[in-house]
Image (cartoon, helix red, strand yellow):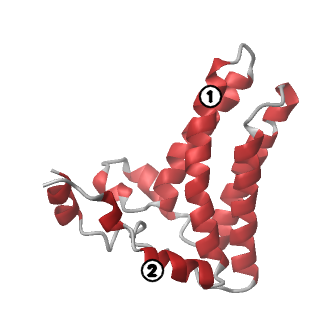
Amino acid sequence: MALNVLSFINFQGIKADLLSKNFSVYGQWNGLLCVILCLALGIANLFHVNAVIVFGIIAIVQGLVLLFVEIPFLLKICPMSDNFNAFIKRFNQNWPRAIFYLGMSVIQWCSIILMTTSLIVPAIFLLFSAIFYALAAMKHQQFQNSAGNVMHTAETFPTDAAIREIL
């Protein structure tokens, strides 16, 4: 019995997310894109013979942290320290996420000081996520998870069933 990854994605829910006009959902989808960009471009920038390598490593770490921020059920699947779990759970509101994304964007913008590289792309998209979450907070929109079924909270994800399905 093969695992069908597409069965975990609710395409109608994704469509509903895009039509919801809730900026926190837009920030969450953009955050998932940031995970991919940070990991891919962080790895790509490890091959520079320059101090930009440090920013590449930082981008990889940012991508991994964002993975846990945007997909919180991973905290249940992957055993982490209580300090890390508490750190990630701080970002369950719009303002903390906006500030978090803005800080990470500023770090990647600083990489331009050393050399202009592709790390500007994660900086731009991290800034977009910060703007989305800030707009959601300013409009007093409730923080909500996506309806696309790819993002459960750590409390609502049925880990036994998921692990059994994967195995």
Rendered view: 87 above or below 14: above
Element assignment for label 2: helix
Residue 57 appears in the figure: no
Front-most of 50 and 107? 50
Gap in angstroms between the C-alphas marked 2 and 1: 34 Å
Label 2 or label 1, whichever comes before in sequence order: 2
Q: Residue at x 46, y 54 (%)?
A: 68
Q: In the picture provided, is 20 more to the left or to the right than 160?
A: right
Q: Position of residue 106 (x, y in %)?
A: 78, 47
Residue 94 appears in the figure: yes
Rendered view: 9 above or below 48: below
Residue closest to the far top? 49
Q: Position of residue 18 (x, y in %)?
A: 60, 77
Q: Which residue is mark 1?
A: 44
Q: Which residue is mark 2?
A: 12
Kindly identify the amino acid type of the residue bearing the numbered disc 2: Gln
